[in-house]
Image (cartoon, rainbow, N blue to C red):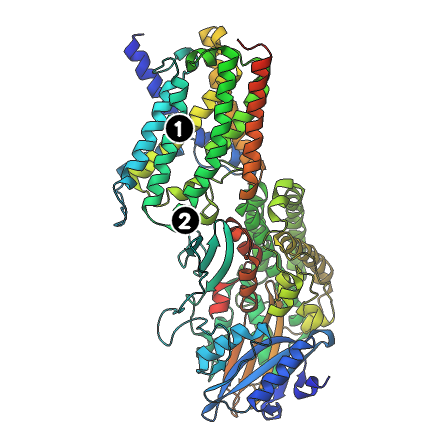
Amino acid sequence: MSEIGLMLLRMAVWLGLAPLLPGLINKVKAAVAGRRGPPVLQLYYDLARLWRKGVVLSTLASPGFVFGPAVAWLAVVAAAALLPLGPLGAVAGFRGDVVLMIYLLALARFATAWSAMETGSAFEGMGAAREVSFAVLAEAAVIAGVLALCVQSGRLTLADMLGESAGPGAALLGAGLFVVLLAENCRVPFDDPNTHLELTMVHEVMVLDHSGPLLAAVLHGAAVKLLFFAVLLVQAVLPMGHWPAGTALAALAGGVLLVTVGVGLVEALLARVAFRRVPLLLTSAWVLCVFALLVAWKGGGR
Amino acid sequence: MNARSEFLPLSNGGAVVWPEVPVRPIESLVEHTAAALGTGARLCAWFGVPEGGGVSVVAVLAYDAEGRLGVARSAPVRGGYPALTPRQTQAHLFERELGEQHGLEPRGHPWLKPVRRARNGAPLHGEFFRVAGAEVHEVAVGPVHAGIIEPGHFRFQCAGEEVLHLEIALGYQHRGIEEALPGGPHRATAAQMETVAGDTTVGHATAYAMVMEGLAGVEAPLRAQWLRALALELERLANHTGDLGALANDVAFLPTSAACGRIRGDFLNLTALICGNRFGRRLVRPGGCAFDLEPDRAQRLLTGVARAMDDLEHAAAWFWDSATVRARFESVGAVSDREARELGLVGPAARACGLVRDVRYDHPAGWHRLAQVPVAVWPGGDVLARARVRWLEIQRAVEFLREQVPAGPEGPLLEPPPPPAGERLAVALVEGWRGEICHVAVTDAAGRFRRYKIVDPSFHNWTGLALALRGTAISDFPVCNKSFNLSYCGADL
C-alpha cells in the first residue's frame, strides 16, 4: 500500500472507528442491567443528526464558544495522529513527539474549559473548575506513566517506546493507565456520562450549551479520546513491536475491545465516588505509575 | 398540662362543634401554642378562617404520646399579630402562608415572604437570602429542570463545592385547590383531592373521605377501612421502591436502578388490579370504597406482592452490599434529631432522624386501630438513614399485606354518608408514604365548607431538605433531594 493510502487508513481508523466504543460500553451496561440497550451504532446516528442541525448561540458568548470545541477536537485528533496503531504505525512521529502528545491533550482540555466559561453559566463554571482540578492529578499520572515507558525502552519516540516491552512494571502501569482512562474520559466512578443532573456533572456540564455540529465535534472528540487512551493502554502493556504484524493487530483490536468491556463493567457495577474522594483515587493512579517508573528505572530499563 | 386545657381535644377523624372550639385573643393563642409545642406537642396546621371582617387563626396540634389532637382558635384578627415563629420554628411556613392567604402580618417573623405566589400571577419570591463574600458564588437551579420532574427553584449560596445555604422557592404548581373548596363539597371535589399530589392519591383521598365522614358523624364500613389500608400500603410500596431506584440512579449504580424502575411498575399494577387505575384513582370515596377486592383477586394480589418482593429483595441486596453505594450515602445530607424536632419533620424524613413519629401508630384511625404497623426508625438523619427507613417500611408493608389481605371483614363496602353537619370542624390525619397528611374542614351553618385546609407532608419537610444541604457538597444535592423526595404540587396546592 502506498504511504498516502496507509496514512488515510490510519486516520480512517481513528475517526471512523472511535464512535463504536461508547456504543459498546452502553451495550455492556444494558446487558448487565438486563436491558436491550441502544444500538451499538447509536453514536453514529447521533453525530449524523447533530451535524444536520443548527446551532444556538448565546448572545453573551464570544467567538471562543465556537472555537473551543473546534480546537479541542483538532487537538485530540492531532494527539491521536501521533499515537501508533500497532503495526499500522502512526500518522506522524518524530523524536520527542511524546511531549507534544501530552501538551495536545492539555490544549484540548483548555479549549473545552474556555468555551464552557464563555456562557457565564454557574453550572458550566463549576464543571470547568472540577475538570481542571481533577486534570492536575490525572496529568501527573499520565506523565509518570509515559516516563516509565521512556526509561524502560530508552526511546523518546512514541512508536519505538510503545513497541518495546513495558518490563516487569507492566501490570502497575496498566492499572494506573486504566484509572487515568476512566478519569480522562469522564466515566464512572469519576463522572456519570448518563446523568441528567447538572450539579453532579464534570465533563457533560461543560458542554451543556453546545448544540448541533459543535456538540457533534464534542461527542466525536470524546470518542476519539476514549479510543486514544484504550490504544495507549494496550500498547503500553503489550510488547507488540516484537510480534508479527497480524498477531499484533489482532492483539491490539482484542485489547481495545477488552478495555471497552472493562469500562462498561465498571460502569455497570460501581457507584460513582463522591467528588471529595476523586483526588484519592487519582493519586492512587499516579502512585501506580510512579512505581512502574521506579521498577523500570531500577530493574532492567535501558 | 396547663396548656392542654386551652385546646379542645379530639381524636383523628373526629369532629367538634365550631362554636365550642376555645376562642382566645391572638396573643394568648400564640402564647399557649408556643407553650404546648415546647412541651411535646406538634403543629399539624395553623391557618386562617375569614370571620366577621377579620381572620380567625386556627391551631391544630397533635399530642403524639397521648394519641390526641387539640384545636383552638383566635378571636378575629385584623392587621397583624406577634408571630409564633421566633419561638417555634415549625410554624414558619404556616405563618408565611397565613400572611399570603389572608394578609395578616406575623410581626417579628424572621423571613416573611410569599410561599406560593404574589397577589396575581406567577410566583413572586422577593429577595433571596444571600451570603456576602468574594469567595461566595450563587447557583440558581430550576424551575425548569433537566429531568422529567416538577418545577421548583433552588438558590444555593456556595463556597467552592460546599453549600453554605439553600433557599427553596416553590409555587409554580399552584392550582388554587384550597380556594376552590369553600362552598363545597362540589361534585368534582373527590376527584380534585386525588390530584393534590398525584403520587399520594390514596393518602389524600382517604384523608378527604375521613373528613367527610367525620363531618357527617358516621364511619366508613369496616370492609372499606380494610381496603383503604391495603391501598395505602401498596402506594407506599410503589413509591418507596421507586425512591430506592432513584437513589441508586443518582450515584450511577445501574443494577438496582434498572430493577427498581420495573418493580415499582409491578406494585402500581397491583393497585390497578383493585380499582383499574395504577394510582388508585376513584378507589376511595366518602363513605367507603368504590371497588371491592373479591377473594380470587385478593389471592392474585398476594401472589403479585410476593413475586415483586422477591425481585426487590435481590435488587436491594445489590444496593446494600455495595461498598461504593454506602460510601456515597453515609454522613451525606445529615439532619440532627434536634433540628428534625424543631422543624416538625414528618414521615420517613423524621423517622430517619430517630424520631418515633407515625400517624398509623400515634393516631390510629380506620383499619389501623385493628392492625398495627411497627414504626420503622433509623438513627443518623443522613441519606443512608432515609434509604434504610424506606427499605424497612417496604418490608413491613409487605408483611402487613401478607397478614391483612386474607383477614378482610365481610360486609358492605360503600354507604354514602349523610350531608355534613353545620358549624363543625373535622380533622383527619393519614400517614401517606411521605408522612403525615392533614386535612381540616370547617363548615358553615348549612353544612357547606367555609374553609378547607390541606397540609401535605412536603409542607413540613421542604425546610428539612434545605437544612440537610448546609455544609454538604453541591454535587450531593440530587441524592439528598431524592432521599427526601418531596412533592412540589403537594406543597403548592
Label 1 element class: helix
Residue A21: where, in percent of width, then height?
44, 28
Q: Amino acid at mark 2?
A: Phe
Q: Residue at the far front: name it.
A: B134
Q: Quadrant of residue A293?
A: top right
The residue beneath circle 1 is: A105
User: What mark, if any, has residue B283 been given in the picture?
Assistant: none
- The picture places residue A209, in percent across and down from the top left corner, at 34, 45
Q: Quadrant of residue B317?
A: top right
Q: Chain of mark 1?
A: A
Q: Residues within 10 Å of mark 2 (few under 14, many from 20)?
A: many
As drawn, the label of residue A123 is 2
The alpha-carbon separation of the residues under discs 1 and 2 comes to 23 Å
Q: Is residue B234 above or below residue B329?
A: below
Q: Name the one closer to the observer, A274 or B148.
A: A274
Residue at 66 percent across and 88 percent down: it is B6
Residue B403 lies left or right of residue B277; in this view the side is right
First in sequence: mark 1 or mark 2?
1
Residue A254 visible in the current orientation: no
SS category of the residue bearing label 2: helix
Q: Quadrant of the N terminus of chain B?
A: bottom right
Q: Residues within 10 Å of mark 1 (few under 14, many from 20)?
A: many
Q: Is residue A13 above or below residue A129?
A: above
What amino acid type is highlighted by mark number 1?
Answer: Leu
Instruction: Please name whichever residue, B367 or A123, is drawn nearer the observer in this view of the structure.
Output: A123
Host chain of mark 2: A
- Vertical side of A25 occupied by B380: above or below: below
At x 73%, y 64%, the residue is B407
Q: In the image shown, does B46 or B435 lie closer to the viewer? A: B46
The residue sitting at 37% across, 22% down in the picture is A100
User: With respect to residue B298, does B63 lie above or below?
Assistant: below
